[in-house]
Image (cartoon, rainbow, N blue to C red):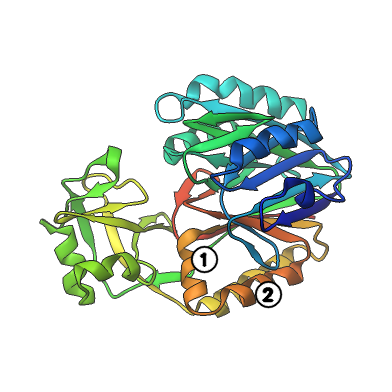
Amino acid sequence: MKQFFGTSQNGNLQEAVRGLKSPQLIMLLSNSEQFETHVKELERLYPHVPSIGCMGMSYDVSIVEKGVGVIAYYDGISAAANVLEHASTMPVKYIKRVETDLAAIHGSQNDTVCIDFCTGNDACVLTTLYSVLKRQGISLVGGTGDAGKVSVNGTVYQDAAAYALIKNHGGRVKAYKENIYRQMGDYRFVASKTDKANYIIGELNGRSAKKVYQDILHVTEREILTQTFKNPFGKINGTDTCIISIKEVNGNALTCFRQVNDSDVLILLELGDYKAIVRNTIQTIRNDFPRVSAVFSVNCLFRYLLFTENHYMQDYLKEMSVLGHHAGLVGYGEHYNNQFVNQSMTCVVFE
């Protein structure tokens, strides 16, 4: 299989798809002003080609912040694209679509992956998708787009999750997740007075969540939203840690990007040696895949901001490019199998 990546910094779709011939799946990464126009134009240019899209920055060896990026696959894949509607209330209503699409491409564990773009209610959407995928051991990688809209096959949807199933006829596929944080001290917090619908943590160990965070890290209320780049919360899930980023201060409470429930046990995380961790991820992939056809990744917006602030983003993309044909999306939350995580990188590698 082969991966195409085309861009236009000023949002010219014709420029972004220049040289793209006979695609078998297209992913559109656009901006809020031109998204719907791009969806219609893409369908006109490539009618009947499966496609999914969302709003967000894209990248290969450089970032496209406000224009348009197009990632496409061709020459040796089977693909299907579809949508789970009513993501906030009942995505499971559309689960038959996933089952039908998976059967149509003859998806199997070692050579098939699901890529999804979601507008919200990620945990529920992932539970729905993965309930089908896990039966055959198929991995999922994806993320949340901007502005509450996604596209599938030329149609724009709100309150939905767009997904693409890709079968690689040329070899294996494998999903990865990268965590650049480690546990800080031995802090343990029991969450209470949470608002699951709005991702709010009211108290930690019976005290104001905001005050607990401030007292430990010695930050002002204004500094909390940037301190979370270095010190997010974490929730231990078996041998894994799910990162929970702070979105905003809400009175004495904290609003997060991921749901926290009453009685959840949280820890505090700190930034590790992210450059060494990135090098280790790259080496792991190279050990697993001596021959790489393509890499698609989703990097969290907070990682992008952190790397940019530390003048590392361009070096990061250059390092990832050694894998060959690396492209991806800057998302507002990352998906890895049935996990909805923050401040992470998830990717799928195609042999």
Decide which of 44, 93 is in the foreground and name it: 44
In the picture of the structure, the residue carrying the numbered disc 1 is 304
At which x and y percent is residue 135?
Answer: 61, 33
Q: Quadrant of residue 281?
A: bottom right
- For disc 2, the neighbor class at 10 Å (few under 14, some 14 to 19, many from 20) is some
Q: Nearer the viewer, mark 2 or mark 1?
A: 1
Q: Position of residue 226 (x, y in %)?
A: 34, 69
Q: Which mark is residue 319?
A: 2
Residue drawn at point x = 43 percent, y = 35 percent: 124
Q: Residue furthest left?
A: 206
Asked if residue 107 can be seen in this view, the reply is no
Task: Between residue 198 and residue 64, name the one nearer to us.
Answer: 64
**SS assignment at label 2:** helix
The reply, left or right, for residue 250 in relation to residue 92 is left
The residue type indicated by label 1 comes to Tyr
Element under disc 1: helix
Measured from the top left, where is residue 104 in percent x and y? 76, 25
Is residue 70 visible in this depiction of the protein?
yes
Q: Which image quadrant for residue 207?
A: bottom left
